[in-house]
Image (spheres, rainbow, N blue to C red):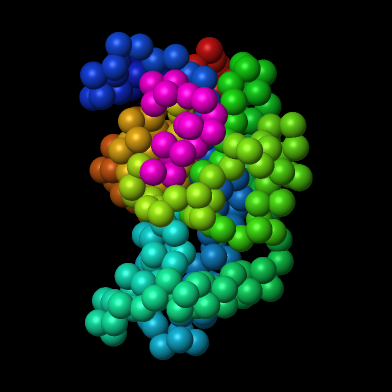
């Protein structure tokens, strides 16, 4: 797949004169870790304990948003009640507990090799996640030591507006010292793709879940890959070299 067409389209779409990659910002769940199936189960079980119905499809559709925002929206839709951030946090803490009880999710196949290629190019690597779970942040810096440090991680608590707003990726750019035309976003979720596009970054979607490709391309993804190993191999062929 030649990047010339997508890059030209990207530049025209945003009115930029040049594309000079300087930083790559990764989403976490479903991108760095094969964790979404466990998250979906934790979401369904935890919300059921509070009388809220949530399906597997709901979990994937809202992936990338701040957990407390997802909870407040679902409670409003199902009960017509606007709960406080504090109440939403209590509910999210239960979801977090159930998720951690399921053990450690494996790394996404191909992600380490992809980071090695990106690092060799001299590009900065950051992580932009809707999660705010401290154990996961610590795991990031351990699993991707030499590639990712805490100063280049954006969590749910770094912004007041989560994905699909551009704020998380704009914060990621700020931490990386990069402008939109210098930034590549790697996402797997519709809300995340929408956030990357809204931040005017070159946004790559990797469909690691059960959603149809159209769920990602309709949000404006500049490139689409079926799995992370495909993106790793394409990058190895100097996709942005």
Magenta part, dominant SS: helix
Q: Which residues are magenta?
A: 167-182
Where is residue 113 shown, x and y percent of the image? 67, 31
Locate the N terminus by quadrant: top left
**Is 197 placed above or below 216 here?**
above
Residue 211 appears left or right of 120? left
Q: Residue at x 31, y 38 (%)?
A: 198
Q: 189 above or below 175?
A: below
Please name whichever residue, 109 or 240, is drawn nearer the observer in this view of the structure: 240
What residue is rendered at 71% in x and 43% in y? 141
Q: Does residue 132 sit above or below 42 in this rendering?
A: above
Q: Position of residue 33 (x, y in %)?
A: 61, 50
- Image spot of residue 8 (x, y percent): 30, 16
Residue 127 in view: yes
Residue 170 magenta-highlighted: yes
Q: Is residue 113 in view?
A: no
Residue 157: percent from the left, percent from the top? 51, 55
Instruction: Please report the residue visible at 50 percent of the width from the left and 67 percent of the height from the top.
Output: 40
Position of 25 with respect to 213 (left or right) is right
Q: Say whether residue 224 is left or right of residue 186.
A: left
Please report the residue visible at 35 percent of the width from the left and 35 percent of the height from the top: 199
The mark tally for this picture is 0
Q: Where is residue 124, by image quadrant?
A: top right
Is residue 59 in the magenta section?
no
């Amino acid at each position: 797949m030649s990047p010339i067409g997508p890059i030209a389209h990207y530049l025209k779409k945003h009115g930029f004169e040049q594309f000079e990659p300087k930083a790559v910002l990764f989403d976490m769940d479903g991108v760095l870790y094969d964790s979404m199936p466990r998250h979906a189960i934790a979401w369904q079980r935890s919300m059921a304990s509070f009388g809220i119905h949530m399906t597997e499809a709901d979990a994937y559709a809202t992936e990338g948003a701040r957990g407390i925002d997802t909870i407040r929206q679902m409670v409003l839709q199902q009960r017509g009640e606007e709960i406080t951030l504090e109440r939403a946090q209590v509910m999210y803490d239960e979801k977090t507990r159930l998720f951690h009880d399921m053990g450690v999710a494996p790394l996404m196949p191909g992600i380490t090799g992809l980071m090695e290629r990106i690092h060799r190019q001299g590009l900065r690597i950051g992580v932009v996640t809707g999660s705010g779970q401290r154990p996961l942040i610590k795991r990031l810096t351990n699993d991707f030591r030499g590639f990712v440090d805490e100063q280049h991680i954006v969590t749910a608590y770094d912004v007041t507006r989560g994905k699909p707003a551009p704020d998380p990726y704009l914060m990621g750019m700020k931490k990386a010292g990069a402008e939109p035309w210098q930034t590549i976003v790697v996402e797997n979720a519709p809300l995340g793709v929408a956030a990357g596009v809204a931040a005017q970054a070159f946004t790559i979607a990797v469909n690691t879940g059960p959603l149809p490709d159209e769920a990602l391309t309709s949000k404006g993804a500049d490139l689409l890959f079926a799995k992370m190993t495909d993106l790793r191999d394409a990058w190895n062929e100097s996709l942005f070299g």
